Amino acid sequence: MEEGETVRKILLAILFFALVVSLVGLYVSANVMIDVWAGQKYSTVYKVLMNAAMLLIVIYLIQRLIIQPRNSD
């Protein structure tokens, strides 16, 4: 393996880690924002909707990125 390719893969891994950290921060901040804006009565409903949307997005991305490339081989 070429040295430049190794450096590229390391940088890509670091960027993916940074992406995951930023997504977790965004998720936590969105939950706090829901608590502040929606109030006690409706915050649970908004959190359920947000979590369901996140679940659907993740399932879709897993299907597109992992399952479909295996089927095309």
Image (cartoon, grey):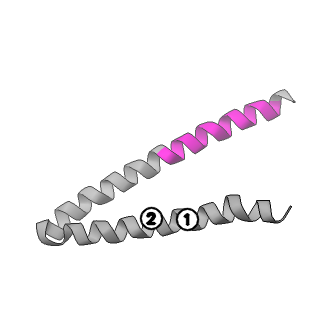
> Residue 42 location in percent, x, y?
18, 72
Describe residue 3's horizontal placement relative to residue 22 as left or right.
right
**21 lies above or below 26:** above
* Residue drawn 24% across the image and 56% down it: 32
- What amino acid is at disc 2? Met
Q: Main secondary structure of the magenta part?
A: helix
Q: Is residue 9 magenta?
A: yes
Q: Secondary structure at mark 2?
A: helix
Alpha carbon separation for disc pair 2 and 1: 9 Å
- Circle 2 residues within 10 Å: few <14, some 14–19, many ≥20: few
* Residue drawn 53% across the image and 62% down it: 58
- Circle 1 residues within 10 Å: few <14, some 14–19, many ≥20: few
Q: Nearer the viewer, residue 70 or 47?
A: 70
Please name the residue that numbered disc 1 is placed on.
Answer: 59
Please identify the quarter of the rendering in which residue 13 is found. top right
> Residue 40 location in percent, x, y?
12, 66
> Residue 21 location in percent, x, y?
46, 44
Describe residue 5's horizontal placement relative to residue 55 as left or right.
right
Quadrant in which the N terminus appears: top right
* Residue drawn 79% across the image and 65% down it: 71
Describe residue 4's horizontal placement relative to residue 65 as left or right.
right
Sequence-wise, the earlier of marks 2 and 1 is 2
Magenta stretch: give its range.
4-20
Marks counted in the figure total 2
Give me the disc on residue 38. none
Q: Nearer the viewer, residue 2 or 71?
A: 71
Q: Secondary structure at mark 1?
A: helix
Give me the disc on residue 54. 2
**62 lies above or below 52:** above
